[in-house]
Structure formats: C-alpha cells, structure tokens
Amino acid sequence: MAKRIDVSGLTAYYGSHKAIEDISMTVEPRSVTAFIGPSGCGKSTFLRTLNRMHEVTPGGRVEGKVLLDDEDLYGHGVDPVSVRREVGMVFQRPNPFPTMSIFDNVAAGLRLNGNYKKNELSDIVEKSLRGANLWNEVKDRLNKPGSGLSGGQQQRLCIARAIAVEPNVLLMDEPCSALDPISTLAIEDLIGELKERFTIVIVTHNMQQAARVSDRTAFFNLAAVGQPGKLVEIDDTERIFSNPSVQATEDYISGRFG
Amino acid sequence: MDITTAPTDAPPPLSQPSPTEQKRAARGATRPGDRIFLGLSRGSGILLLVIMAAIAVFLTWRAALAISEDEGNFLTTFEWNTQAQPPVFGIAVLAFGTVVSSIIAMVIAVPIAVAIALFLTHYAPRKLSGPIAYVIDLLAAVPSIVYGLWGALILVPNLNGLYAWLDQYLGWTGILEWNGGAPRSMFTVGVLLAIMILPIITNVSREVFRQVPQMHEEAALALGATRWEVIRMAVIPFGRSGVISASMLGLGRALGETMAVATVLSPSFEIQASLLDPGGGTFAQNIASKFGEASEFGRDALIASGLVLFVITLLVNGAARAIIARRKEYSGANA
Amino acid sequence: MSHAVVTDKRPSSLRGAQLPKWSPWAIAAGSLAVAVGIGLAAGLHSRIQWGLIAALLFIAGTFGIAARVEGKRQAKDRVATSLVWVAFLIAVVPLVSLIWVTVQRGMKVLDGYFLTHSMGLVADSEPGGGIYHAILGSLEQVGLATVIAAPIGVLTAIYLVEYGRGNLARAVTFFVDVMTGIPSIVAGLFILSLMLIFDMQPFGFAGSLALAILMMPVVVRSTEEMLKLVPNELREASLALGVPKWRTILKVVLPTSIGGITTGIMLAVARIAGETAPVLLLVWGNPFINANPFEGAQASLPLYIYQQYANSAGSGAAYDRAWAASLTLIAFVMILNLLARGIARWKAPKTGR
C-alpha cells in the first residue's frame, strides 16, 4: 500500500505571500519522516501541499511537482478529492465529527467511497480501531458520540478514521501537541506500528519526539519573518541529531534558537 | 463557627443583629444615585412583565366576552357572523388557512433559504458573497405592505400560467386542481409568504454555517470528500439546530403576517379543497379585513381570534426554544 | 489482506475523467435554449414556467452528463452545486423584481408636489394628491413610539446585563423572548381592547403604543448584546477608582457601547416604520392633514399604501400613488438601515472589536 513521495521545486503561496520556496525531497515508503523547524517556517504548509489541502485555504496555491509513485498530484486533470483519498491526514487538534458516533466516525470515509455491506463495514471499523490501539477502550460504546472520548482517544479515533480508507500515505500535523504525555506516548507507539503499512510524514515541535519516532528528519528554516520557509537539510534522523551537515540545524537542535 | 468570624469586615452573620450594620449591608454599596438608577432599570424590566401580563389578561377578557355569546362552537364553526342575533362565529377556517399558508411558505422557503445560505458560505466567489449577503440583509427590512402590494399587482397576474400548468400535471391530486379563478388563493399566499421570510431564514442560517469550525470541514476534506459531502458530513449536522431556529423565526412571521395576506387573498369563510382555488382566510387577515365594519361585539370576536393566534405563535416560539436547548445539550460535549 | 474490496472500488489512477471547466455554463446555456424552445412551441405564456423548465433541465442535464463522464459521487456533487445555484437564482428573481418594480413604478408620480400635499378631497380613483399627511402621521407615530420604547428597552437591557440575577431577571429575559414573537396585529388588538374599555376613538398615539410594544423587545435584545461586548476590565477599572456603579454605567459602559445601541434602535425604528396592521386598527387613516397625534384619526405611510391599493377599485392613479408611497417608505427604511450600519462600522473599532 505504501508509496514513495517525490517532491521537486515546490513553492506555495497564500495570496501574494510566498510561504515556502523551492522545496525538493524524497520520502521513502514504509518509513516515518519528521519535519522540524521554528514556528512559521512553513513545515505545516508544506505538509498540506502533500495532499492538496493547502489550496483549501483562500488564496492558497502551489507551483512545482509532487510525485506519488510517478504520478504528479498537481498534474493536469488530477482530482484533489482522489488525491486526499490516497493521502490521509491527522490534524493538530483531534477533530472527530461531533454529531457522529464512534462507529460512524471511523466508517465516514468508507461510506464516501463505496457501498459496503453491514458486516464488511463493521469488520473494517474493528480492524481500523485495533490498528489505532483503540478497540479495547471503545468496543462497548461504538454507538456513543466520538466527542465523549478523552483527547488522546479522540486523536486515535481520528487516526483510525484516516487509516480505515487504507491510504498510501498518512500525514500528521503535530498530532500530539494538544495531548498529555501519556496519550502522546500511546500515539508514538502507534506511529511505530503504522509505519509497517503506511508512509508516514509527521510535523512536530518536539525534537525528542522526532528523534524517537522518525527514521528521517527534515529541518526547515526561514531567513527572517516574512521570508519564505526553506528546506535546510533532510537526512537520517540519527545523523541529523548527532552530526548534522549544516550549522543552523545544529544550532536549532541544541536549542540556540527557535 | 471558625474561620468566618475572624475578619471584621465580613458581612455580619444573621444570628447577630446589629441594626445599623445590617441596614447598610442590605442596601449594598448604596447611594441615592445608585438606588434611583437601579430602581429605574428594574422598573423598566417590571414594566415589560406588566405589559405582557396585561396583553394576556385583556385579550382573554375581551375574548371571553365574545365567546360567551357565541351560538356556534368557537373552534369548529365555519362561519363568521357577529351581526346575527344570536351571533355565530368560529375559527376553524382561519386556523386551517393560517396553518396551510404557513406550511406552504415553509416548504418553499426553508430549502431555498438553506441553499442560498450554503451558496453564500461555500459556493459563491468571495467577491460576490459579501455584497449579496448585505443586500439580502436589507431585503429582510422591506416592510410587509410593500411585499403585499407587489404580490397583489405583480405576482398574482404572473401566476396564471403556473396555475394552469400545476392543474394540468398535478390536478389529479385534487389539492392542486384549478377552476380558472383569479390566482388569489392560499397557494399564492404561501408563495408570497415564502418570498417574505426567505431573507430572514437565509440570514440566520448563513450566520450558523459560517460558524462551522474549520477543523470539521478539513477532517471531511482529508478523507477525500467532495464539497457536497463536506457539507453533508460537517456543515449540515453542525448547523441543524440553527437552521431550525431560523425556520421557526420565519414561521412565526408567516403565521402572524397580516397585510401581505390581506392584499393577495380573496377571502371567504369556507375551506377550499384545492389550494389553487380562491377562498379561506387567516387569523391576521380576517382581523384586518373584518375590522372596518365590525361593531364593538364584532371587535371582541376578532380579539378572540387574535388571542388564538397569540397562543399559536407562543407555542411555536416555545417549541423552537426547546429544540435549540436540547440540541445544545447533545452537541455540547464537542466544544 | 482482507479488504480487496477497498482496492477494487478505488480508481487505478488519480486522474479521473473530468468535465471541462466551462461545462456548467454550457449545460446552463443549453437548458435555457431548450426551455425557451419548449416554451415557444407549447405556447407557455408565463416566464415563471420557462425559468422552472430551464432549471429542471439544468439539474437533470448536469446529473446525466456528470454521472456518465465522472461517476456517481462527482455527479452528486455537481447536482448539489447546480441546485444551490438554481435556488439562488430562483430567489433572486422575485426579490430583484420587487425592488425594480417599486423603483420603476414609484418614480412615476413621486415628485415635490407628491411629497408636500395631502390627499384632501382627491377621490381615490382620480390622479393627484400626495403623501404629506401620511409622512407626517408616520413620523409622529414612530417618533412617539421610539420615545417610549427606546428608554424602557435600554434600561431593561441595563438591568439584565448590569444588575440582573435571580428570578426577576430570568422572567424578564424569558418574556422579552416571548414578546419578540408577538404578531403585530396582536399588539394592535391589545391596545384596541383598552380603547374599547374607555370607549375611545382612533388616534395616532394609540398606534404609537402598539408600535412601542413591538419595538421594546428588539431594543432590549440589541442593547443587551452591545452591553455584553463591553469588557469587564473597563467596569472594574472604574469601580476600583471609587466611582459609584450608576456613574460607571453612565460614564463608562454606555459611552463605550453607544454606537451599537444607536444602531439597534435605528434598526428597530426601521422595523416598526413599516408596520401596517396595528395602525390600521388603531389610527384608521385620514386623507386630511392631522398634525395632532393625540386626537382624531391620522394617516400613516404603510397604511396609505394599503388603502390606496384596497379602496381604489383597480384605478391606475391609486396604484401609482401606492407604488410611489412604497418607494418613499422603502427609501426611508433603507436609509435608516444604511445609517445604522454606518454608525455600527464607524463606532466599532473604538469598542476594541
């Protein structure tokens, strides 16, 4: 299922403001890639260009190429809706649909994509909830609203919802920033399991988290406020945290700015 | 007693009356200015309550005077003859007409208003949606008599073709049969009321749809939902209670609308089988049209019918509030 | 993997077949052309039908074409889009027509003479006459209603926001809500029941009282909203300086929110200025100038429109006057609305919002 992402020369705008400039990188399948960098460096914007969510923001537009196993997401005639089906996303704040039950939340994406029989649907929902390490906690209350869960459980519910449609890539935008340390740990463990099946890209503010969960790390930076963000370097996580090739990366990681 | 006795400036416990201190405490931080101002503002609030009570009392009293003389059954009589000796009158026709015209108005107006609200928040180009919303806001302020004049002189003559058409294709249903009379029927009233309440429902619904949290819409988008699916998954469920309350607001206005009905309808005191045939009446319209030549007793009878309208609108408003309160509870946990 | 199902149902490529960007316009133009064709061929006179046929064709056409080319989900999405557009257009037609017709027909007799003369002895079916008496009556009735309702409404709102706790405040809040829903004719009947008791003849001030009842809850609601926007820090800062509460309200809270309160009152005035029903019951109307709102029947602008329409037996001259009076009334209401919004916008930044 997992696919490779190949980005070349990607620039994204908000109206006339250039948010990120000329980014090229490769994200390997079945691995976790972390994006780190100071606030405003465009790492979240870049993440959102990978499933064409950036253009949802008014004035958002993109130049450049994003290849998903040789197919350009921004190519002529590509439907953003089918892109988002292939590239799932988990957001900063847990956002289960408030009026839907836990079951319906997980099934939401499936119901869009086809007609499933009742038992097919419950099989997939169970499998996804198990995949998100949530099954044991919610199996007795699948018909209760998803908004009744704790923050960490809600976030895992959102992960279950995202993986239920079996995407090729899973994007996570600071998925733990609104959670307590124990819930964070649960999500980090889950990421470790999910990378067996998916290509995972995660934006994080927490460098320990990047070091713990990712195989490769990309460091983003911006020259000054108002300037576009740029990719400084991308390398194996171990190397980035022990012996980065750029001075700015080392300064950031050792806490000298950011 | 332990902690509370310690500070000297704490309010004295009730068990130890110290007359001067107690008086001061009861008045709070009073000065003449404060007392007068509080008195004035509280008095205004009380005056409002008194007015409401007076409305209920006087309407009920005058209505009772009339109903006690009524030879017919006030609720079921198909007649309004207050001059007769003894007088015979009943509200059956009016209740029917009021309900039917309001239902027609709601059936037409609510879906269109919701669609326009969605149009403004999710479909229209931004440059267009701002000015359009502004204009619709202003249209909500157009006086109902102007809608009435427009309805009578412009809408009615233009409905002949539509009536013939409805009769041709849907006449077999019975309720959309047309005998060729002037289109001054309950159906036309419903259409006009729909046009009148459209801006109100649209405005409130638009406000509600605008408040749908971005993150719910993005959640749907990220699952690969089309725009319509986003609306169905995230926008409509969130906005439902707001749309209901907006509709109730519109319904309240449709039920009590007087002039637009009085100008368009050609009234009669019978219930027409077909919505397209002229005749029937509504509470408010009947009061306005019968009032001119009514005797004092006749006016009391009209007041009695007004009381029923008052009660109906109270019930509708109460229902709207109950629905909203319950919905709030249901979706409160997601905040 | 247990779900071969999922992979089967998904297109092999991101690139689904897509309709070109101009296709909605093309379908719209096509449906319009066909509808006009059908209309002409079948001899349908009413333009309403032409429009409805075009709308139906547009929606059906969109669904058919999109379902064939893009698949069912996309087709549903496109149908939703076209439905929303069609709903918008359907609604725009009557509303635009209302404004257009009022302006166009209203201009016919609206001139200086019309605004400065009463109907006097002009018969309803004859041309001539004007609305001076009606404007005068409306201004007096609405003015008196405002003088009564605005202070009571503002004070009630102050009570609710600044003092209101406990049962009385809850009762007031509840009944203000109830009062908002009173149909205007019921307010008229209430004053009428009082007049019946004292055996009074119709006069302008009776109308003012009914209008005041309709206006009060609107003023309370809008003023409440505005007072709630005043940050608590401001009140506390003033109270901490030892300023008594009533002076804090008068000197700090009200000045901060005065723009919004004025806006609310003006919108309420605009609303009652168009009320016809209570005026019909309580003021009766009068073709002559009566400047005294406390004695004798008076005219009023909305009532004038109704009477010109209802008593004219189809006379064109009376209809012209009705349209001209409508235009005057709409202009008055719109100017009030625009001014109110202007004030709201102009005052807004000062309240820190």
Image (spheres, coloured by chain):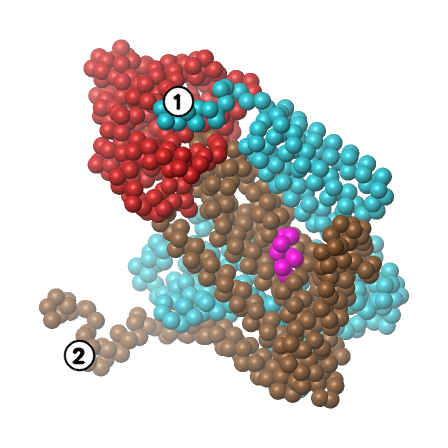
Chain colours: A red, B brown, C cyan
Disc 2 chain ID: B
Q: With respect to residue C157, does C351 lie above or below?
A: above
Total labels drawn: 2
Element on which disc 2 rests = loop
Element on which disc 1 rests = loop
Marks 1 and 2, how far apart at CA? 75 Å
Q: Is residue B105 found inside the magenta-colored segment of the image? A: yes
Q: Nearer the viewer, residue C5 or C290?
A: C5
Q: Position of residue B143 (x, y in %)?
A: 67, 59
Within 10 Å of disc 2 (Cα), the crowding (few <14, some 14-19, many 20+) is: few
Q: Locate residue B310 relative to residue A235 in the image: left or right.
A: right
Quadrant assignment, res A137: top left
Mark 2 — residue? B15
Q: With respect to residue B245, does A159 lie above or below?
A: above
Mark 1 — residue? A168
Q: Residue at x 22, y 24 (%)?
A: A212
Can residue C246 be seen in this snapshot? Answer: no
Q: Mark 1 is on which residue type?
A: Asn
